[in-house]
Image (cartoon, grey):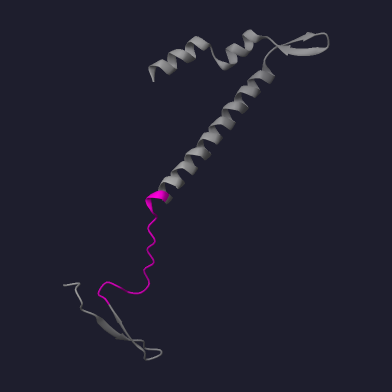
Amino acid sequence: MCNGTKKIKERNPDTGAIRSRKPMDYGNENINHPTQEEIIAYNKEQANKMHQEIQYRVRKEVLNELWAAPKVNHQGHWYVRLSDVVKIIGDDNELYENESQS
């Protein structure tokens, strides 16, 4: 079937109005494809949301571990030993090794 200048004429049964249309055009298609800029903006927004969620979860887990760590009372103030903090966060050498491998 040729999609050239051929038109289809049809009558509305309710009003009797005649309408012409191109083949495969039924008048109810609403196709709004996003532009490349809109797709990029959407992907950046989703990546930022995911990054913020990950940061929130990591921060929450670290703070929970710090609160649960054994504390030392010095002059009425409670402290966590730095060695315990390093164990919770992770050893610097281990972090640098993981970064160099990726």
Q: Is residue 24 above or below residue 72?
A: below
The location of residue 96, given as percent across then percent down, is: 46, 14
The location of residue 67, given as percent across then percent down, is: 69, 20
Please state the total of marks drawn on the protein image. 0
Q: Is residue 79 above or below residue 64?
A: above
The location of residue 17, given as percent across then percent down, is: 36, 89
Residue at image position (20%, 77%) is: 5
| Quadrant holding the N terminus | bottom left
Question: In terms of secondary structure, what is the magenta stretch mainly?
Answer: loop
Q: Is residue 22 left or right of residue 90?
A: left
- Answer whether residue 29 is magenta in the image: yes
The location of residue 19, given as percent across then percent down, is: 33, 84
Nearer to us in this view, 53 or 3: 3
Q: Is residue 76 left or right of residue 45?
A: right
Q: Is residue 100 left or right of residue 55?
A: left
Farthest-out residue, bottom: 16
Q: Which residues are magenta?
A: 22-37
Residue at image position (25%, 81%) is: 8
Q: Is residue 76 left or right of residue 11?
A: right
- Answer whether residue 2 is magenta in the image: no
Residue at image position (83%, 8%) is: 75
Residue at image position (35%, 74%) is: 27
Nearer to us in this view, 1 or 3: 3
| Quadrant holding the C terminus | top left
Farthest-out residue, left: 1
Nearer to us in this view, 64 or 50: 50
Farthest-out residue, front: 37
